[in-house]
Image: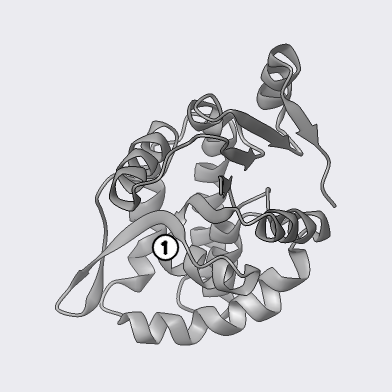
Amino acid sequence: MALAIFDLDETLIHGDCASLWAQHMADIQWVDGESFLAREQELMALYSQGKLAMEDYMAYTLSPLVGRTPEEVEFIVGPFVEDVIEPIIYSDAMRCLAAHRAAGDRLLIISASAHFLVSAIGERLGVEEVLAIDCELQHGCYSGKTSGVLTYREGKVTRLAAWLEAEDESLDGAHFYSDSRNDLPLLQQVPHPHAVNPDPTLRAHAEQAGWDILAWH
């Protein structure tokens, strides 16, 4: 049994769940839509350029959750996943997940989005195990802060290493699927890296390294 590891945004789904969640918060009036979304898009542009300080993005996008309980947020996330995320799941991603599942591989999603989003989407995809950005709770409510190492760039490598040790797992025979230049640190750690609909930087690296390049629809 090998590990089959997947990035989430723009890999398993055709979109970024954090940006879509920001839009959803505007739709349900948890935020002032126009100004909030404009700033969120500025931060996402930095992400695409590999220049984002993820702490800045999380501090901004978690601010509407301050004082809200996990149960309150989960109540909103459920319909969000059903209405917004399900229609943009790549069919090819579902087939890939099914193939690894049939092979007896252990499935893991590792994402630079908030855990409450990634776990709910993972459940819809039939993937129970996820590593994502953990959000701090104080007195049973979201504080607006993150906790622990963020699963972003080299942080994915750090968090995965800790998970492997805790689970007595290894990267022997492991696959990792991602679209993003930001995941190059982890892609370089696995024996079977797959570039899925890669951004230009990742595509160039994958072509030079002879990695598998996939077009998912």
Question: Which percent across, then down, holds residue 203?
Answer: 73, 24
Question: Which percent across, then down, holds residue 130?
Answer: 46, 59
Give the residue pinned by disc 1. Answer: 115
SS state under label 1: helix
Q: Kindly give the residue lying farthest to the left in the view shown.
A: 139
Q: Is residue 79 above or below residue 199?
A: below
Question: Which percent across, then down, holds residue 129?
Answer: 47, 62
Is 128 left or right of 70, judged from the image as shown?
Answer: right
Q: Residue at x 39, y 37 (%)?
A: 53
Q: Amino acid at mark 1?
A: His
- Judging depth in this view, the residue of 133 and 19 nearest the camera is 133
Q: Is residue 156 above or below residue 124?
A: above
Question: Which percent across, then down, holds residue 115?
Answer: 41, 63
Q: Residue at x 70, y 32 (%)?
A: 199
Question: How many neighbours does mark 1 have within 10 angstroms: few (below 14), some (14-19), or many (20 or more)?
Answer: some
Answer with the quarter of the image where residue 197 lies: top right
